[in-house]
Each structure stands twice: as structure tokens, then as C-alpha cells.
């Protein structure tokens, strides 16, 4: 073994000036968010591609979904993001009770959103939507929905929903640990960054999938 | 993070929330007005970007982070998405042109 192997890691990488002016935890969280953002960017570009190549006109989403219901889901997610931001700031200011209360409200918002999404999924599956297209003879098939439509819907909202679910797990763990006084302010901030990212992705899905005219 | 030093550090979240709701309602209302398709798409995409900037800037505190961090996040995602879209669009147009209708 050469002498260099015996030198502790800190001597090789002492940290020094942080290029992003943030702790390594926060920097890594942002890098994770960028990579996860690229995943959704790829999914949305793929959706755009499928939509452009649709052999029949893309259906009006108002005929398939209840847009006020989707707007309510958006309202819930935006509101939960506000509570999450409040929880992060409260944790930074050392107000553990306020941080915990707002974390619980955020979890509640996330649960309502997931419940709404489960309802929406069951509704559209009942109407005949499958990952590979609409079932022959179903309500959706009668609307002339191309197979790309339900495929895009399930992939986009499914990936987003799985992120909401994992965000909820992180938030529940953070809330329990905050209640026990074990989570530092930065822990709440990391959970918050992830939750806001989930909200951010929904802004794109809501506009590009539900609102964009056919 | 500088907003914790302000008299009411929670105000920014409420203000952002109200603005986001107003924008969302405006986007929903725009669907009801019979705007030309191009204008409607431009309106929706513009406000989508405004919402994204507000969430990342105010909720995720990106505007308080080092400028390099904002560049890493913004340029990283935006440029890669544009490159991906720029590669996919001609391909889609090519397939569309060859597909009998």
C-alpha cells in the first residue's frame, strides 16, 4: 500500500469553499431535484411527441375529466406547499410547535391529493381506460380517444402520484422526528424542497396535460 | 435565508399562495374565453412558467440561494428539455408526413 492511501480522506477533500454557498446536504438535494426534474422533462417531452403523432385529434380533456375537480387537486397541492414553506421557516426560527402543526397540515393536503388521484384513476378506469388504450365499446372508446391518451395520462400522473406518496412518507417521518425534537431545521428544509418539487411538477402536468387545448 | 429576518417571515408564503391561486383561476377562466388557439397556448405556457418561477423562487427559496445554484437548476432542466424537444419535434414531423391519413 502506498503512503497516499494512509492519508485520511479529509486531507484529500477538506471541502474548502462551497461553489454553491450551501451545505453538501442541500447541494445534493438540489442535484437530486435536477435529475428528477429531467425524468419528468423526458416524460413530458415523450407525451408531447405522442400527442403530435396521434392518428386522431387529441380529445378535449373537458370531455374526459372534470376540470373543476382537477383544479381542486391543484388548489390542495398549492395550499400544502404554503404550509410546508411555513413549517420550514418555523423550524429555522426554532418554533417546533408551529413547524409540527404545519407539517401535519401538509401531510393532510398530500393525503387529500392522493385520495383525489385514486378517485380520478378509478373513474377513468371505470370508463374503459387502460395503459394500452381504451377498451372497445367503452365510453372512452366512443369518444374516439387515441391509445396515446390514456397511456400518457397513466404514466404522467402515475409517476407524479408515486412522488407524492414518497413525499408523504418522508413528511410523516419528518413530522414524527420533529415532534420528538430529533430533526434539525435542515431536515425539515430538505423534506420541504422535495414537497415543493412535487408541487412544481404538478404545475407542468396540470397545464400541459389538462389545460392545453387540442 | 434572508426571509427569516423579516418582521413577518411567513408572509411570503401566503402572498405567493394567493398569487398562485389567482394565476390558476385566470388559466381556468382563459379556457372559457374564445381566444385564438395560439394566444391561449401562449397565455397558458407563460403563466405556467410564472408559477414555476414563483414556486422555485419563493417556496423553494431559490432566489435566496447562491446564483450558481439557480443556474444549475434552471439552465440544467430548461436546456436539457429544449434539446430533447428539439430532437423529438423533427422526428414527429417526419413520421407525421409519412403516415397515411
Image (cartoon, rainbow, N blue to C red):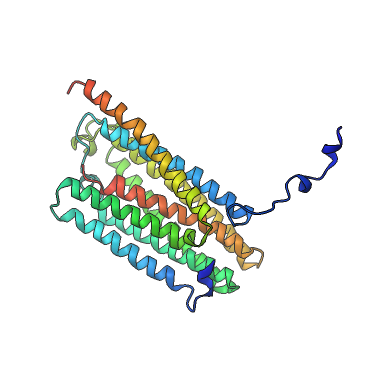
In the rendered image, which quarter contains the N terminus of chain A?
top right
Q: Position of residue A132 (x, y in %)?
A: 33, 31
- Residue B32, position in %: x, y? 16, 55
- Looking at the rendered structure, the number of numbered marks drawn on it comes to 0
- Residue sitting at x 59%, y 72%: A96
For this rendering, which residue is in front, B83 or A82?
B83
For the C terminus of chain A, the quadrant is: top left
B78 relative to A63 in the view: left or right? right
Residue lying furthest bottom in this view? B7
Residue for point 31% across, 26% down: B91
Q: Position of residue A42 (x, y in %)?
A: 41, 37
In which quarter of the view is residue B89 placed? top left
The one nearer the camera, A8 or A148, is: A8
Q: Is residue A77 above or below residue A52?
A: below
Residue A187 sits above or below residue A90 on the image: above
B76 with respect to B97 (left or right)? right
Q: Nearer the viewer, residue A44 or A140?
A: A44
Q: Tell me the residue at 55%/69% (across/down).
A: A99
Residue extending farthest to the left is B34
- Residue A163 appears at what percent x and percent y? 47, 48
| In front of the other: B75 or B60 | B75
Amino acid at each position: 500500500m502506498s503512503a497516499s492511501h494512509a492519508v485520511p480522506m479529509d486531507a484529500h477533500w477538506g471541502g474548502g469553499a462551497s461553489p454553491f454557498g450551501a451545505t453538501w446536504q442541500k447541494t445534493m438535494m438540489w442535484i437530486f431535484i435536477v435529475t428528477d426534474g429531467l425524468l419528468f422533462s423526458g416524460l413530458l417531452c415523450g407525451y408531447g411527441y405522442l400527442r403530435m403523432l396521434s392518428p386522431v385529434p387529441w380529445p378535449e380533456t373537458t370531455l374526459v375529466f372534470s376540470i373543476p375537480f382537477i383544479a381542486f387537486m391543484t388548489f390542495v397541492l398549492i395550499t400544502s406547499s404554503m404550509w410546508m414553506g411555513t413549517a420550514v421557516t418555523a423550524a429555522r426560527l426554532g418554533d417546533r410547535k408551529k413547524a409540527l402543526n404545519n407539517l401535519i397540515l401538509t401531510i393532510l393536503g398530500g393525503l387529500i391529493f392522493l385520495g383525489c388521484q385514486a378517485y380520478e384513476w378509478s373513474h377513468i378506469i371505470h370508463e374503459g381506460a387502460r395503459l394500452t388504450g381504451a377498451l372497445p365499446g367503452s365510453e372512452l372508446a366512443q369518444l374516439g380517444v387515441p391509445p396515446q391518451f390514456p397511456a400518457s395520462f397513466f404514466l404522467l400522473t402515475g409517476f407524479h402520484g408515486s412522488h407524492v406518496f414518497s413525499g408523504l412518507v418522508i413528511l410523516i417521518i419528518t413530522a414524527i422526528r420533529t415532534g420528538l425534537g430529533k430533526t434539525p431545521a435542515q431536515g425539515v428544509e430538505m423534506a420541504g424542497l422535495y414537497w415543493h418539487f412535487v408541487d412544481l411538477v404538478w404545475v407542468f402536468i396540470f397545464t400541459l396535460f389538462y389545460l392545453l387545448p387540442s | 435565508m434572508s426571509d427569516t429576518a423579516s418582521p413577518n417571515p411567513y408572509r411570503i408564503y401566503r402572498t405567493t399562495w394567493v398569487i398562485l391561486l389567482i394565476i390558476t383561476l385566470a388559466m381556468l377562466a382563459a379556457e372559457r374565453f374564445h381566444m385564438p388557439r395560439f394566444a391561449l397556448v401562449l397565455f397558458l405556457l407563460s403563466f405556467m412558467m410564472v408559477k414555476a418561477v414563483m414556486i422555485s423562487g419563493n417556496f423553494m427559496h431559490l432566489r435566496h440561494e447562491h446564483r450558481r445554484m439557480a443556474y444549475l437548476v434552471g439552465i440544467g432542466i430548461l436546456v436539457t428539455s429544449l434539446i430533447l424537444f428539439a430532437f423529438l419535434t423533427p422526428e414527429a414531423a417526419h413520421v407525421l408526413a409519412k403516415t397515411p391519413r
